[in-house]
Each structure stands twice: as C-alpha cells, then as structure tokens.
Amino acid sequence: MKFYNSVGPNPRVVRMFAAEKGIALPTQDVNLMAGENRQEEHLKRNPHGQMPCLELDNGAFLSEILPICEYLEEKNPNPPLIGTTPEERGETRMWTRRIDLNICEPMANGFRFSQGLPLFQSRMVTVPEAADGLKRIAQDRLKWLDGQMAGKQFVCGDRFTLADVLLFCFIDFGGQVGQPLNTEFKNIAAWFARVKERPSAKA
C-alpha cells in the first residue's frame, strides 16, 4: 500500500487511525497548497482531486477517509476501532456518520468559504455568504453532542473508535481556523484532553 498524504484534517484522520492500529503506511506527500492534488497525476488516483488517497497492493485506489479506514480495519482487525460485532460496528458507524455530516462537513465548508476562500475559490464552488451559518450549525451540533457525551469516556462509551478519531481531528482543526471549541462544552473538552494524550494524536 501507499498513502498519499497532505496537510489538512482528512489525511490526519487516516494517519491517526493507522497509528492506533500500529500500521506503518508508506507515504507520499501531495502539495495541496500548490494545487498538486488538482493536477492530472493525482486526478488519475482520485478524479475528485481530493486528499487523501490510498493505493492498494492490487494497484486500485481508495479515496474518502471513512472507506479507507474501513479497509484498514478489515485488513488489520486488531485492535478494533470500528467493532467486533454487528452491534458494535453499527454503533460506531452511526456516530461516525452523525459527526461527519453534522460537525465535520459544516465546519470544513465554513472554513473553505471564509478564511480558506483565497485557496478554494478557484478549485470548487464556494458560497461565502453561507460561511457564518455553516459555522453556527457545527457549533450547534457540538452543543448537542456535548450533552450526549455526559458520563461517557468516548463517543461509543468505553470503546475508542473511528468516531473519536474523526471528531478529534476536526475539533483540533477547527481550533486552528477560527472555530475553537466552546469552553461551555465541558464534556467534549474533557474528552478532547483525554484523546490528545494518546500517542496517535501526534500522527
């Protein structure tokens, strides 16, 4: 396998997931800032021109962070970060989808349409007037999640999962691009501090 890596929270999710599993991925960096991901060589790997991308041993390419992590889990089931039973896997996927759609996506587009606009406006459809609303949506859903996290060690209770990896990487990213975690969200703040102590958080 070969992992095509770049700056940004999406590649970091895969790096942290792999680190939790003890998987050493051969890596090739793609210069996102210079637009290398939008050039022909990378478009052959991922026609969306997005990062990251995983080249499999059979020469095929996987993109999108959640399918990449699912693939790594199937190839390396231990330690389980999605689950060992249908019930555990269902719970992890439920929370991962909630976090991805309701927090990560509006947070990322809120950045792309505001602070990140100079970089992204020539690469994708941008809607600057939507930026503030998207950021509000992400914060509203974080407030909801904070309530759900009461009394829990991790998103899925006692299990550290892909949902935690995804949430951690994007909350950390938000703090770097003008969307810091609200200090009133004390359950998530305590969870974030716990996850930040894991060696994989440095991946």
Image (cartoon, grey):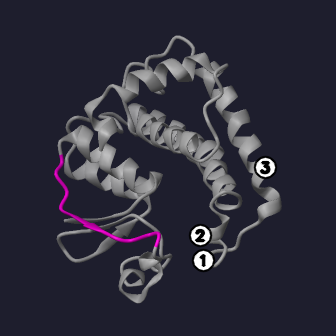
Residue at (42, 82) in percent of width and height: 43
Q: CA distance from mark 2 to mark 1?
A: 8 Å
Residue 119 numbered mark, or none = 2
Residue on which the image places disc 1: 123
| Quadrant (top left/top right/bottom left/bottom right) for the C terminus | top left
Residue at (41, 88) in percent of width and height: 40
Q: Position of residue 187 (x, y in %)?
A: 56, 17
Describe the element under mark 3 as helix, strand or loop.
helix
Q: Nearer the viewer, residue 169 or 33?
A: 33
Q: CA distance from mark 2 to mark 3?
A: 18 Å
Specify start and end residues of the magenta stretch as a single range: 23-33
**Outermost residue toward the top in this view:** 151
Asked if residue 27 lies in the magenta stretch, the reply is: yes
Q: Position of residue 144 (x, y in %)?
A: 68, 27
Please say if the residues under marks 2 and 1 sit with CB atoms less than 8 Å apart. yes
Residue on which the image places disc 3: 132
Describe the element under mark 1 as helix, strand or loop.
loop
Residue 69 numbered mark, or none = none
Please say if the residues under marks 3 and 1 sit with CB atoms less than 8 Å apart. no
- Please tell me how many numbered marks the rendered image carries: 3
Query: How dense is the environment of label 2, judged by Cα within 10 Å: few (below 14), some, or many (20 and up)?
Result: some
